[in-house]
């Protein structure tokens, strides 16, 4: 199946699909950038901010007020790496260097939205609310059943103005109703929570340029993340143990999100923790219980995976979110 997937633990979402060999569907930003040269400009985050009239500037133009958020202009892999808050002019001079830009600090809900787009018009969308944890991590994501009319109108107008000839999947991340990042792909962490017919509709979108999904299986879902402390090695639990957890009623999938045979430094992880697993489920309570069980399988105590950083890191992350 020509769905480009570089993370082996997420290939389980695409193993049952089929499509013509000429259809190319990216799920990774590097592939999406290369497959869509006419629209690859959206990976320039400074342009994203400027397209909305947000206060922003390159590293050589100092902000007029603080705090601001600083991040790489373009980062196609592990896109949150290198991002940080700047609280003062000193922070700006020390941390906002070549290749970085700053923008107005946005507050409010962090939403990830997947859109099916046909020639710049929205044919389908689904919103996911991120529940922040410490230092750049998320405790879990809520794949919402409901619509968000105001956010949809804002994104619809932005897509119509900036991607009028684009057809395909599009992911947009927003904070407080304003766009912080856009991706020429869908979110590959939870496609199993969109319904059994959803992936086939995506294939037809790329093959025929149409969207015909009857979204009758839409239901609220959750993507629960297990982090462990940095600086220690981890081994996978026994496959039978993981399979037993996955067979729990309410669990859709479990992904072990690291390479057991690679050194820690080969993994790009947020400062708040080392991501061990993702549990996709339709019952949050069940997902949290399975996460706690998996933590024990990894040899972690509750304090080890729930409190991974200092209170200062938590405060900074709360301000960011």
Image: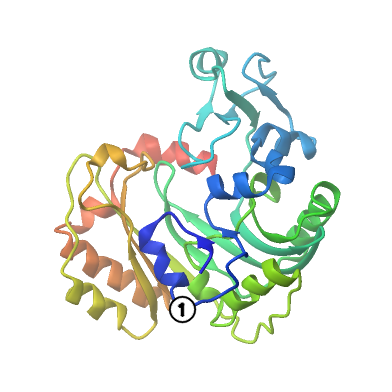
Task: Pinpoint residue 294: horizontal percent, then vertical percent.
Answer: 23, 66
Q: Is residue 65 left or right of residue 82?
A: right
Task: Pinpoint residue 122: horizontal percent, then vertical percent.
Answer: 78, 64
Regarding residue 221, the answer to whether it shows in the image is no
Q: Which element carries disc 1, helix, strand or loop?
A: loop
Query: Quick one: which residue is furthest to the front in this view?
Result: 21
Quarter occupied by the C terminus: top right
Q: In percent of the image, x 59 and y 33: which residue is there? A: 74
Residue on which the image places disc 1: 16
Rendering quarter of residue 277? bottom left
- When the figure is inspected, residue 74 is found, relative to residue 169, above or below; the finding is above
Rendering quarter of residue 59? top right
Q: Residues within 10 Å of mark 1 (few under 14, many from 20)?
A: few
Regarding residue 117, the answer to whether it shows in the image is yes
Task: Pinpoint residue 141: horizontal percent, then vertical percent.
Answer: 49, 62
Q: In percent of the image, x 62 and y 64: which residue is there? A: 22
Q: In percent of the image, x 17 and y 46: which residue is there? A: 233
Q: Nearer the viewer, residue 203 or 286?
A: 203
- When the figure is inspected, residue 140 is found, relative to residue 176, above or below; the finding is below
């Amino acid at each position: 199946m020509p769905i480009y997937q570089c993370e082996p633990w997420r290939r389980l979402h695409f193993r049952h699909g089929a499509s013509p060999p000429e259809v190319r569907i990216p799920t990774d930003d590097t592939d999406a950038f290369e497959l869509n040269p006419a629209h690859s400009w959206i990976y320039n985050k400074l342009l994203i901010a400027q397209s909305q009239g947000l206060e922003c500037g390159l590293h050589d133009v100092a902000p007029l007020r603080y705090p601001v958020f600083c991040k790489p202009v373009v980062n196609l892999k592990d896109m949150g790496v290198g991002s940080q808050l700047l609280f003062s002019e000193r922070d700006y001079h020390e941390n906002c260097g070549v290749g970085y830009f700053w923008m107005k600090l946005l507050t409010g809900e962090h939403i990830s939205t997947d859109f099916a787009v046909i020639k710049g018009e929205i044919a389908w969308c689904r919103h996911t609310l991120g529940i922040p944890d410490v230092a750049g991590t998320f405790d879990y994501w809520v794949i919402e059943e409901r619509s968000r009319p105001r956010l949809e109108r804002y994104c619809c107008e932005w897509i119509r103005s900036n991607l009028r000839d684009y057809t395909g999947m599009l992911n947009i991340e927003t904070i407080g109703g304003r766009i912080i990042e856009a991706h020429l792909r869908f979110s590959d962490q939870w496609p199993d929570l969109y319904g059994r017919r959803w992936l086939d509709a995506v294939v037809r979108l790329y093959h025929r340029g149409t969207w015909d999904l009857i979204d009758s299986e839409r239901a609220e879902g959750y993507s629960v993340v297990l982090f462990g402390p940095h600086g220690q090695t981890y081994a996978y639990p026994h496959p039978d143990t993981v399979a037993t957890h996955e067979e729990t009623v309410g669990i859709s999938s479990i992904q072990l999100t690291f390479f057991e045979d690679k050194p820690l430094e080969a993994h790009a992880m947020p400062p708040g923790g080392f991501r061990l697993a993702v549990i996709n489920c339709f019952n949050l309570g069940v997902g949290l219980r399975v996460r706690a069980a998996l933590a024990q399988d990894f040899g972690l105590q509750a304090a080890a995976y729930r409190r991974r950083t200092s209170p200062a890191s938590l405060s900074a992350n709360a301000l960011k979110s």
